[in-house]
Amino acid sequence: SFKKCPKSVPSFNHTNCKRVNGPEFTSKIHNFVFFAMWFYSNSWPSCSKEKSEILKNLDHVCELLNTIDALPGLLDIVNGEFDLTKNYLDLVVTYTTLMIILSRIEERKAIIGLYNYAHEMTHGASDREYPRLGQMIVDYENPLKKMMEEFVPHGKSLSDALVSLQMVYPRRNLSADQWRNAQLLSLISAPSTMLNPAQSDTMPCEYLSLDTMEKWIVFGFILCHVALNSDAAALSLWKLALQSSTCLCLFRDEVFHIHKAAEDLFVNIRGYNKRINDIRECKEQALSHAGSMHRERRKFLRSALKELATVLADQPGLLGPKALFVFMALSFARDEIIWLLRHADNIQKKSTDDFIDKHIAELIFYMEELRAHVRKYGPVMQRYYVQYLSGFDAVVLNELVQNLSVCPEDESIIMSSFVNTMTSLSVKQVEDGEVFDFRGMRLDWFRLQAYTSVSKASLGLADHKELGKMMNTIIFHTKMVDSLVEMLVETSDLSIFCFYSRAFEKMFQQCLELPSQSRHSVCFPLLCTHFMSCTHELCPEERHHIGDRSLSLCNMFLDEMAKQARNLITDICTEQCTLSDQLLPKHCAKTISQAVNKKSKKATGKKGEPEREKPGVESMRKNRLLVTNLDKLHTALSELCFSINYVPNLIVWEHTFTPREYLTSHLEIRFTKSIVGMTMYNQATQEIAKPSELLTSVRAYMTVLQSIENYVTIDITRVFNNVLLQQTQHLDSHGEPTITSLYTNWYLETLLRQVSNGHIAYFPAMKAFVNLPTENELTFNAEEYSDISEMRSLSELLGPYGMKFLSESLMWHISSQVAELKKLVVENMEVLTQMRTSFDKPDHMAALFKKLTSVDSVLKRMTIIGVILSFRSLAQEALRDVLSCHIPFLVSSVEDFKDHIPRETDMKVAMNVYELSSAAGLPCEIDPALVVALSSQKSENISPEEEYKIACLLMVFVAVSLPTLASNVMSQYSPAIEGHCNNIHCLAKAINQIAAALFTIHKGSIEDRLKEFLALASSSLLKIGQETDKMTTRNRESVYLLLDMIVQESPFLTMDLLESCFPYVLLRNAYHAVYKQSISANA
């Protein structure tokens, strides 16, 4: 209460003064207003103390009203007694509102009855105040009717206070055209006076709420209705208020329907037929014209506030002299917004067009912009008004006080304290950040108004109007120094939206749907910062409820804004991806064909076939007015991004919201889904986009996202890093499959499986897998997914991490094949052991070979391993090419490190280097990924020596099985592809890589084991040279070439070693034979 406010005057012995006790008077008024708010928030008292508070506060009201009736002077809101008159009218309206709300509690009688019963049970007797409280409930069943009787003795004071509004209310309640003709709120209409301070004889009335004045007039003249018959000014005010609105706000979203209530009250009063007709006429006027009038006002205020905000943003120094304009603009706009909100929720006419304003967001936005200017440049305003108070106001007030003919000692002391307080001010206080507090000075002025209103007062403000006007101006200036935040709340608080959630959300949706208004959508989350101002210390439990509502609404608004921006960005990305797709090589075939046909003068096709538009046609504009869909999307996006970028963060109930983070989060989620969606993977048909096409689309998408930085201050690189790095893993952060997992599965389960089935072959000459002619044509062309350009695109998309995952998946398949091979070796272990030591005994070897089982299975599994390793070799080469472009210096350093490993280096150290090299796509003598995969197969039931023996016998098994390939018709070597159609040329890579990995694991000599393999293989192949069966030796020369491939592929074998085992002349003859056969076959 105001009792706790600092005082700047000496204490008085008020018991000896024959005047009203000013501090007690003002304290009672404010306590009652606070109590009324508490009462409605709690619905009904629940204990004895609270019940007695109701009756005590009602007694205070009656006492205050009787005290004010005793004042001889008129309550005049214009001439010096603004605070006294305003608080008196607030007291009356609050009292009336409280009684109306009390009457709307349906179970009020039952509640107090239950309370009294509980009191009897607890204390053994009824509450002594129960009869009086019960009587009050009965008496106020029709509260306005009862209060009309109560206010008969207070009629003169109340009507005098209300009639004083005739200088204020009609001037405020003008049409938009009148405002426009007067160039209201315009700073640039008169450039020569732009720096002059905005002055008015009624400073506090200029920004007084129109809604508040209408409540004073409507409720006031209902209570003192006699004045309507005797005073033309009163009737004029009453009719003007009735024509402006159909309902008034009681409290929050509780409304009072003016015309019906007034008509119901006056219909029972004799001689009031004329007043009833006035009410009906005003109602018709309000229903037909009020909506359009307020619509035009809002239209004017949008342009006026925009101009004001723009000028002040460019010249913030004008906030000093033109502060009054700012608060007038805020108050006017707030009144119109609240009027619309209230009436849109309580429409009483069929046509609702006047109550739907799709541009309301723009008006709220400019209000928020003005509020932001005031908060930002508060020190500028403080400097201005500190100098104004000390340099002008103090001087003028001192002169006025000196010229007073009569000035009692008490009043003189107060006036002198005003002058001294203002004179002591200096700009240095502002620069030092000193906190100003003029509440005591303002309270003293309030007290002085009360002192000068009593009977036999020596100094009457009614006789010294200039003093009252000057003091009202000074009070406004002090508020500009120490109460800017409170002034913003007083003139522009829109916390009422908290209680109109449905209308609030509807306005937001309308704002987003209209592209021209979406730039103002940030005003809705900004309004959520107002909500806590509608709470009160008398109802602390309400803070959490309202706080939670403000948080949820703010979060919802920001989320919807980010979603809308994300959808626009997605649409733009889709358009750009379509344009990028037109530039793909596959689309140029038709253009080339047309050019060739035109050159050879051939028919270009069907007559009338439209000529295909070339890429880039969409950028050719013949008319500036031509707007494409892409133009509309960019315009809408720029508008919405302005809103998202308007504030870096906003604080709602001690929670900080960052609008840009909402957009970043949504972009990350959508970018992730889009990348996966653009793969167009169909699990049923096993179709997937080519890596090069996906890369083109992703780059187009990223180009659009990078352009977002031109609209919003966000780190789009962070989005790329988060999303693309997740796409290099098996699953993303949400547990969803990534492009890495999709492409890995497709290459393993679709492409390589078809290679195993004999439908696709690896062509070393083309470094790609190619479809073979078969009865059942495949649904995809393997070459379009595995050539060097596609593999490079795949490496760009998956990156080193994704390619590592691909390699690990490939190695897992190889390890499963090796496990099966080991089982076959165990089945034939005894025979293989004998063959290992009998390679120089041809007859014995032939006999032992016949005892072997699953020879074809061994060769097929080794071929599969070779195919997988060949595919991995393509992937590694592509990765190396990509990294060499992105990080050439790092790749060259890794390569140099790998090439200069000393031979005597410990194998663990060497494997670490190989792992680093493999991650960079460099080929290694020993594949670290294969070593890791095969190491995991070690069985606990088999000793290391036995494992080593199995590995050695596996190489023996493969070596002695090679001759059987000569009988296969598909083993024919093709010089054109530098390989065999059944992929047996991949055995060279499989034999070398498997041997290197196995004997690294078992710490054996790789070179010795490969020499042993070469000896066995050459011995076995030389033996088929002596065969006479043409079917058995059908492709003998093609199989001979495998030995050369094995040596060429191996870093451990040399041609000299091969020469010692297998005559080179046979290899030369074999090459000659296969090339000759190829030529004859082509002929």
Image: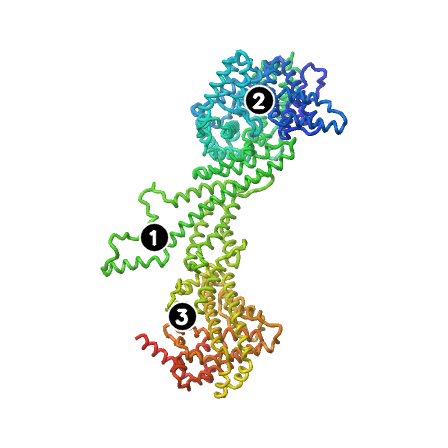
Question: Mark 3 and mark 1: span between their CA atoms?
Answer: 35 Å
Q: Position of residue 1060 (x, y in %)?
A: 46, 85
Residue type of the residue flagged with mark 1: Pro
Q: Is residue 52 above or below residue 902?
A: above
Q: Position of residue 506 (x, y in %)?
A: 49, 36
Badge 1 or badge 2: first in the primary sequence? 2
Q: Dot 2 corresponds to which residue?
A: 472
Specify the quadrant that holds the C terminus. Answer: bottom left
Residue type of the residue flagged with mark 3: Phe
**Label 2, residues with CA under 10 Å away: few <14, some 14-19, many ≥20:** many
What is the number of the mark on residue 615? 1
Question: Mark 1 and mark 2: span between their CA atoms?
Answer: 72 Å
Q: Position of residue 141 (x, y in %)?
A: 61, 21
Q: Is residue 167 visible?
A: yes
As rendered, which of 358 and 128 lies closer to the eye?
A: 128
Q: Dot 3 corresponds to which residue?
A: 763
